[in-house]
């Protein structure tokens, strides 16, 4: 169980579909992909972004970074924000950090902050987003 959330904090949960489209390799042979997602549940949104990857996933040792722009509706408010990903996998396990980029909120989601976790079960993708959003004006 996660610790208590600070005052003004909230949690959004649901599922998402993701499509990765390979792009030409970046300099040095780094893998490059177009990210497209559809979120459902507490966050009803779509996103687009770019992912870079390196290492050898087939051997269980790799890493990726990504930036995606999410646009939709959260807690009855419309707007957008950017998510920044940093993930690695190795013999020590998998480590993933996803944060809402400071200053990226737009529309009624301006000033949003927080983090997201994802869980994959088979082919199904789930998210939990812990966020803070100032009261609506």
Image (cartoon, grey):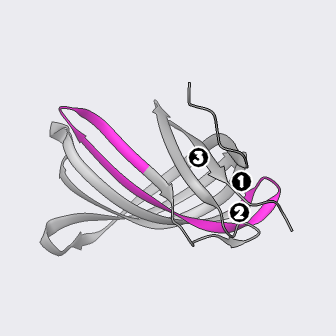
The local crowd at label 2, few if under 14, some if 14 to 19, many if 20 or more residues have their Cα within 10 Å, is some
- Residue positioned 50% across, 42% down in the render: 117
- Asked whether 84 falls inside the magenta stretch, the response is yes
Q: Nearer the viewer, mark 2 or mark 3?
A: 2
- Rendering coords of residue 20 (x, y %): 41, 57
Q: Residue furthest top?
A: 1
Q: Which of 85 and 4 is in front in this view?
A: 4
Q: Position of residue 34 (x, y in %)?
A: 41, 66
Compared across the picture, whether 29 is left or right of 77 comes to left
> Relative to residue 17, is residue 26 depicted above or below?
below
Q: Is residue 135 visible?
A: yes
Quarter of the image that includes the N terminus: top right
Residue for badge 1: 44
Q: Does the magenta stretch include residue 37?
A: no
- Badge 1 marks a residue whose secondary structure is strand
Q: Is the magenta stretch mostly helix, strand or loop?
A: strand
**Residue appearing at x 69%, y 70% in the figure:** 110
Residue carrying label 3: 16
Residue bounds of the magenta highlight: 72-97
Looking at the image, is 115 positioned above or below residue 2? below
Nearer to me, 100 or 61: 100
Q: Mark 2 to mark 1: distance in Å?
A: 6 Å
Question: How many other residues sit within 10 Å of disc 3, few (<14), some (14-19) or many (≥20)?
Answer: some
Q: Which mark is residue 72?
A: 2
- Name the side, left or right, on which 35 lies relative to 2: left
> In x, y percent, where is residue 19?
47, 55
């Amino acid at each position: 169980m996660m610790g208590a959330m600070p005052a003004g904090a909230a949690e959004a949960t649901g599922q998402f579909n993701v499509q990765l489209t390979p792009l030409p390799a970046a300099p040095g042979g780094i893998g490059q992909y177009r990210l497209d997602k559809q979120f459902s549940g507490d966050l009803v949104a779509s996103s687009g972004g770019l992912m870079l990857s390196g290492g050898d996933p087939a051997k269980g040792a790799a890493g990726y970074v990504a930036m995606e722009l999410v646009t939709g509706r959260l807690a009855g408010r419309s707007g957008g924000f950017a998510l920044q990903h940093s993930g690695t996998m190795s013999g020590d396990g998998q480590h993933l950090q996803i944060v809402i980029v400071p200053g990226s909120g737009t529309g009624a989601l301006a000033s949003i902050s927080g983090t997201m976790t994802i869980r994959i079960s088979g082919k199904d993708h789930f998210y939990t987003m812990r966020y803070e959003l100032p009261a609506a004006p």
